[in-house]
Amino acid sequence: MASSPPVFRFAPSPNGRLHLGHAYSALENQRLAARFGGELLLRIEDIDLTRCRPEFEQGIDEDLAWLGIGFAPQVRRQSRHFDDYRRALDRLDAMGLVYPCFCSRQEVKDAVRRREAEAGTPWPRDADGAPLYPGTCRALSETESHRRREAGEPHVLRLAIGRALARMAGAALSYRLFDENVAESEVAVDPARWGDVVLARKDVPTSYHLSVVVDDALQGVSHVVRGKDLEAATDIHVLLQRLLDLPTPRYHFHRLLSDETGQKLAKSRLSQSLADLRAQGTSAEAIRRQLGFT
Ligand code: GLU
């Protein structure tokens, strides 16, 4: 039986214009998909209904076409698939691994400060440097959580990481890392370092972690190529894949581009957009060359 071709994806969020870092990621996906004889999908990660806008999505289409990157015709927009994420949440909930958390950001900060004062040591931080959720709402009684939900109190849904790992009963969790020469190695993961991550935000029945895991499986993605800034988050993705009986793709993490001050390029720092570069007369060819794709 012929095996199906590898499937790659580029998954930008339409919450701003793309910059050179996105161009690099998209071109690296294109290059590796070609090298592996694979297909390249486009996924629009637009679960943030307040920050994502149609004009940014149109900008993504323009920028990618300008760079000369072709995608399979079917584009998945996360905001149209909330039912898929809700189903995954329900499965995790049925396993007793999900709980509502009513804490505001300030309440989390205050709880962390109190714990640090009590213990006289810094509270543990996750791989992105944010303090781990101190578990305040995990301790709420069923009746209390139910009452507050029924009263319409805003809340997120969190994964009870301790219970989730206990369910794995010590099974080794890992993924295959691949490089451009098709060499692979096995990487063990440590999801506990993320604590009780958010699975559903206040306004939508999903989060980055949950939707990326559900979508990679539903789209049959076999090879994930993304920046090193998402390497650590893969630990949570592997755990969710196991809990939901989903396949774990192979992963490759590419380098991140930085600006002249050494800072990582980011929309939040208003890094120069591809649209600006284009308006200034830079050619797509020059960008490809600058980024090492000839
Ligand atoms: N949407 C994410 C971003 O723009 C990428 C998600 C991923 O590659 O897993 O950073």
Image (cartoon, rainbow, N blue to C red):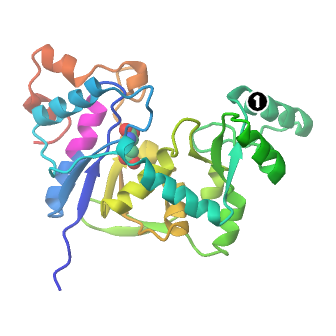
Residue drawn at x 23%, y 35% is 23
Q: Is mark 1 within 8 Å of ligand 1?
A: no
Task: Name the quadrant containing residue 61.
Answer: top left
**Percent x, y for residue 245?**
48, 71
Q: Which residue is mark 1?
A: 107
Q: Nearer the viewer, residue 203 or 228?
A: 203
Q: Is residue 115 left or right of residue 172?
A: right
Q: Is residue 70 on the magenta stretch?
A: no
Q: Is residue 47 left or right of residue 158?
A: left
**Can residue 283 be seen by looking at this rendering?**
yes
Q: Main secondary structure of the magenta part?
A: helix
Q: Quadrant of the C terminus?
A: top left
Task: Name the quadrant containing residue 218.
Answer: bottom left
Q: Amino acid at mark 1?
A: Glu
Residue with the most extreme bottom position: 1
Q: Which residues are magenta?
A: 19-27
Residue with the most extreme right position: 118
Q: Disc 1 on helix, strand or loop? A: helix
User: Compared to 131, does 239 lie above or below?
Assistant: below
User: Compared to 160, does 274 lie above or below?
Assistant: above
Residue drawn at x 76%, y 47% is 146
Q: Nearer the viewer, residue 55 or 143?
A: 143
Residue drawn at x 64%, y 36% is 130
Q: Quadrant of the N terminus?
A: bottom left
User: Compared to 113, does 224 lie above or below?
Assistant: below
